[in-house]
Every structure is written in structure tokens, then in C-alpha cells.
Image (tube, rainbow, N blue to C red):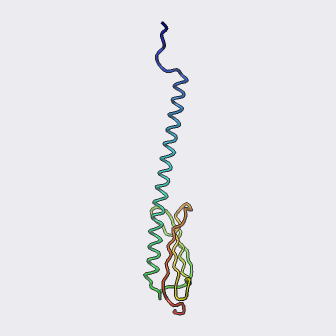
Amino acid sequence: MSRRARGLSLVEVLVALAVASMSMAAVAASALGLLSGRRDGELRQVATLIAERGLEELLGRGAEGLVEGEWLDLVRDASGEFARRVTVEAGPSDGLWHLAVAVTPPRGKPAVEFHTLLRRPWSSP
């Protein structure tokens, strides 16, 4: 009878280490993707809140307090610097104003936009 040596050969150990390393790399990449997605979600949430506040400010002025135009400003938050574009223009039919607020999060992510229509004759000051 022949006796077999106990244990693993060097090739088996190297293959096992390679498989374990690839598994750990896949887990790390997945975790990085989750963290990145979470951060993007948080930035979109803050951008949404800034856009909502901007639209509420416009509506709070009332129809008589609006002036046609477009302006840009920066809003600083703990999450970063957000670009806000506000547009007040003639709506799709006579007597309507189109109000729009678009907020772009830091790092050029897609903007969050809110639009509404407000009734007021355009001939009024």
C-alpha cells in the first residue's frame, strides 16, 4: 500500500488564493458601487429640496410679484455647491406664467427640475 501525503499542493493553494482574491475584489467593487449610489441619492434629495424651496419662494411672491426672466445662482449646502436656474416666462396660453426651477447637484449629475403654471394676465404690471 502506498501512503499519500496529507495536505494541499502549492498549485492548489495558489488557485484557492486566486479565487478568494477575485471574490474579495468583487465584494469591494460592489460595496463601492453601493456607496456611490447612496451618495448620488443623497445629492439628488438635497437638490430636490432646494428646487422645492425655490419654487415655493416664487409662488409665495404671488402672481403680481413675478417678473419675466431667467437667473442663475449657487446654493451652498453641507453636501456641496448646487447650481440653481430659475425661469419665469410666458406660459402655453394667454394669462399663464410658466415657472421653472432646475437644480444641478455637484459633480454634474442630472438636474432636478420643477415646473408649474400660474394664472395672471400678462398685461398686468
Q: Residue at x 54, y 90 (%)?
A: 122
Q: Position of residue 33 (x, y in %)?
A: 50, 50
Residue at the limit of the structure toward the top, as seen here: 1
Q: Left or right: 35 with respect to 90?
A: left
Q: Left or right: 78 with respect to 109?
A: left
Position of residue 121 relative to residue 85, above or below, is below
Q: Position of residue 64 (x, y in %)?
A: 47, 88
Q: Residue at x 50, y 85 (%)?
A: 66
Q: Residue at x 51, y 29 (%)?
A: 16
Question: What is the total number of numbered labels drawn onto the structure image?
Answer: 0
Position of residue 38 relative to residue 20, above or below, is below
Q: Quadrant of residue 57?
A: bottom left
Residue at the limit of the structure toward the front, as seen here: 1
Position of residue 31 relative to residue 121, above or below, is above
Q: Position of residue 116 (x, y in %)?
A: 49, 78
In front of the other: 27 or 80: 27
In front of the other: 37 or 104: 37
Q: Position of residue 84 (x, y in %)?
A: 52, 71
Q: Residue at x 55, y 83 (%)?
A: 91
Q: Left or right: 91 with respect to 54?
A: right
